[in-house]
Structures are given as C-alpha cells and as structure tokens.
Amino acid sequence: MEWLVKINIQLKESILDPQGQAVQAGLNALGYNNVSDLNVGKYMELKITDLTDKEQVKEQVDEMCRRLLANPVIEDYRFNIEEMA
Amino acid sequence: MEWLVKINIQLKESILDPQGQAVQAGLNALGYNNVSDLNVGKYMELKITDLTDKEQVKEQVDEMCRRLLANPVIEDYRFNIEEMA
C-alpha cells in the first residue's frame, strides 16, 4: 500500500519570522496594503510504502518530523495522510 | 471582512529538487527506507482585509503569486481561501 503524506512546517507563533516580514514588506511595497500576518513555512510531500495501517504511517511521519524534518523547539508541524490508488 | 489565505508553492515536476533529494537521503540514512518522491516547497499563510467578495480575494492572491510569491517559470502554486469570523 502506498501513502501520500503532505507536511506543513511553520515557526511557532512566538518566534520572530524575518522572512515572512520581508515578503509582507515586498507585497506592501507593490501596493497590496490589505495584506497582514504573513508567515512563511515549509511544505513537503513524500510517499511511504510497505505499511498497511494508517496508524503506523502516522507514527512514522510524526517520528520523522521530530527527528529530522522539523525543529520542535521553534517549529510546529502538521500533516495529512492519503491512501494512494 | 477578513480572509485567511494558505498558499503552497512547489517546484514543477520537471525541475530538479536538490533540497528534496537531500532531505530524502537524510531520512533514508536514519533508516526510513520506505520513503520516496520527497519534494520540498514553501508554505505561506496571510490575512487579507478590505475585500467583500471571495472572487476578488482569489484574483488578488493569484496576482501576488505571479508577481512576487512564486516564480511561475519553475514553480507551481495553489491556494485556499477561508473566510474568518
């Protein structure tokens, strides 16, 4: 069975996001003055094979996020798992 | 009216993704050998105010993506618009 996993990783709210501020300043400079609260994060898509149980996939993805993909000290992550045909 | 916009930006499929390859190699090196097809992209969240019509919000976000947020030559983007309470 094949699983498609989509992961969003964002800085925690209390952490300063200079990249987001820069992008927002860029938008404002282009005249988009109604834009605010812009945050920039990472998005990952990956495939997982060889697991039959969605719970196991969830456990593995959570572990991968904690060990490598995200920095749990400053980042929050959330993910979504879809079964592929 | 306030709108929450979530934007995912990813490299087009035909474009080499060295960052994705590096992350996948990292996962494989940690023993996650059932992971494949990993792509890394950007995720942005922002708020838009002063528009009452969702179509207008959609037009503005599309324009912002083309002008600043994404590079349409090598990247695809998609977004989701939610009305905020």
Image (cartoon, coloured by chain):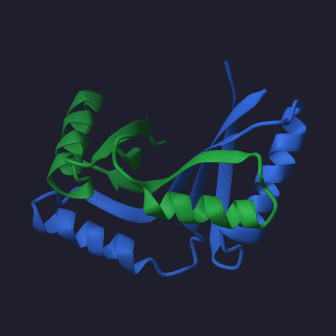
Chain colours: A green, B blue
Of A49 and A55, nearer the camera is: A55
Q: Residue furthest top?
A: B85
Q: Residue A25: tell me if it is visible.
A: yes
Q: Residue B76: image x %, image y %?
A: 65, 65
Residue found at x 26% / y 38%: A57
Horizontal side, residue B46 vs residue B26: left or right: right
Q: Quadrant of the N terminus of chain A?
A: top left
Of A59 and B79, nearer the camera is: B79
Question: Vertical placement of B19 versus A73: above or below?
Answer: below
Residue found at x 26% / y 53%: A70
Of B84 and B55, nearer the camera is: B84
Q: Residue B42: tell me if it is visible.
A: no
Question: Vertical placement of B19 versus B85: above or below?
Answer: below
Give the total of numbered labels: 0
Q: Residue A23: image x %, image y %?
A: 59, 63
Image quadrant where residue A46 sits: bottom left
Q: Residue A33: image x %, image y %?
A: 77, 52
Residue found at x 78% / y 56%: A32
Residue found at x 70% / y 37%: B81
Horizontal side, residue A71 vs residue A44: left or right: left
Horizontal side, residue B62 vs residue A6: left or right: right
Q: Residue A37: image x %, image y %?
A: 58, 44
